[in-house]
Image: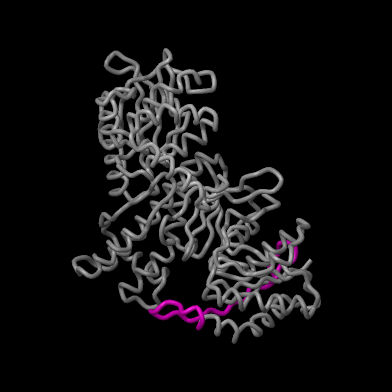
Amino acid sequence: MELIARGAEADIYKAEIFGIMAIIKLRVVKRYRIKDLDLKIRRSRSINEAKIMIKAYDNGVNVPRVLLVTDKLIAMEYIDGETFSEKHSSIIDKIAAQVAKLHSIDIIHGDLTTRNILVRDNKPYIIDFGLASISKNIEDKAMDLIVLERSLGDDLFHRFMDDYRNIIYNADQILERISEIKKRVRYAER
Amino acid sequence: MYTLGIESTAHTFGVGIVRDGEILANVKEMYKIDNKGMIPIKVAEHHLEVGSLVIKKALEAAGVGIKDIDNIAYSKGPGLGPCLRVGFVYARALSLKHNIDIIPVHHGIAHIEIVKSINKVKDPLAVYLSGGNSQILALEGEVVKRYKIYGETLDIGIGNLFDSFAREAGLNPAWGSTVAAIASKGKNYIGMPYTVKGMDFTFSGLLTYSTKLVKSKRYALEDIAFSLMETAFDMILESAERALFISNKKAIVVAGGVAQNTTLIDKLKTLAEDDGVKLYFAEPEYNADNGAMIAVLGEKYAKSGVRFKDADISINQKYRIDKVDIYWS
């Protein structure tokens, strides 16, 4: 097992299990947290994250396949791809289709930045559902897109929205909410 | 350079005097809170009554006269309008009468800056927890900086949560330290609503639930208070830890009235140790609302050479922390 990243919530390992390369996301014990709550949080979040990933996969979104879930870890398929960058801008339509699919089944990613989009053989994969939730709320979908816009930049985001619009029936409502949220003071200068 | 600071955002009228970062005086009078909370106009009347005496005592403690003072800083906001006005009027009157520069400062930033100043720490992640505010912040920018809010409460402040719980549970005085004293006797953790969204958090669900438990009389008050505090602090710590990873800061400063809580400090110490960063905090006297923190921040502005326009010399009940220019780190 090779530690490849340390996050605030989990350690990420790369390892071979069941004969294939896998990513293991281990939610570590927080010593500051009261024990009962620590166990509950690590368990419910691991299960929630896996459930959402499975739902996404079952609905045709490119996400790593879940291999194993316990009360503190998720083992998932390792995607040998590159983090999305400018040079992948030709597949922005495919990314729009992926995000639109997620939103159409009410999955909110919660941290939709380009760091969480991998590209393998010109095919985008969406990763890290650690902050994901299920919601029909327009506000939540708009927030996902605001986060994405910040990391994509204006031009790419425009191209993204052209495709997203074609798939999501209430895209105009979501767009309207985006400009509404941006008018709120807290987001004005972010 | 001597700077006098006046604090009057809420229940405390405080006056502090600093010289080159050294705190020479920190005198305060607090409006007596029983189990009812604060009526702004009554608190303002209290501040008017005690103001002159507090200023006099501070000058005596520092061993200086009003003629020695180079700058007068005051809390511009956020806070209760009538209370802010009293502090502002005292500051303006002294400034006019003795021809002293007047400096408006942000109350929340003063809380953070005094802890930075006492500990001589620069550019930390700031965990600012008081009655009306609960925010995780860090400075951003090159020459002119501003505090960026990484996460904050989406409803009530954490101090407000404890105060409201204290009132609902019939505690006297109805504030956080009474809840903390009872919580220290609790042992059994009761599961409570835990709501963290990214780096933001909400407390109203926790307030409703813990109050309901008190009314049900099925649990010991000690255990309810204990579980309430543990849950609320753990929410703050999770947000702070995420902000620490994202901002990549190497130190944490905890400030504001709630930073007097020892359970909170212990938890933060553990977090800092596990994440390899340093934790800095201050004595309770400098975490509760006080005039010294206003003086410390006022002096930083005076030394940075910034001049305030007449239009800025006012009060602002909803003064936003992320709209204030900062010229140091």
Residue drawn at the location 31% of the way across and 76% of the way down: B170
Q: Nearer the viewer, residue B94 or A114?
A: A114
Residue B283 image-quadrant placement = bottom right
Percent coordinates x, y for residue B69 in the rendering:
77, 73
Q: Residue furthest bottom?
A: B49
Residue drawn at the location 39% of the way across and 66% of the way down: B162
Residue drawn at the location 28% of the way across and 25% of the way down: A57
Q: Going by the image, does B126 lie left or right of B90?
A: left
State whether residue B307 is above or below residue A130.
below
Q: Nearer the viewer, residue B81 or B262?
A: B81
Q: Going by the image, does B235 lie left or right of A184?
A: left
Q: Nearer the viewer, residue B175 or B132?
A: B132
Q: Going by the image, does B74 lie left or right of B236?
A: right
State whether residue B28 is above or below residue A50.
below
The quarter of the rendered structure image containing the N terminus of chain B is bottom right
Percent coordinates x, y for residue B97 in the rendering:
78, 80
Where are the magenta residues, as a range?
B17-42
Residue drawn at the location 51% of the way across and 39% of the way down: B246
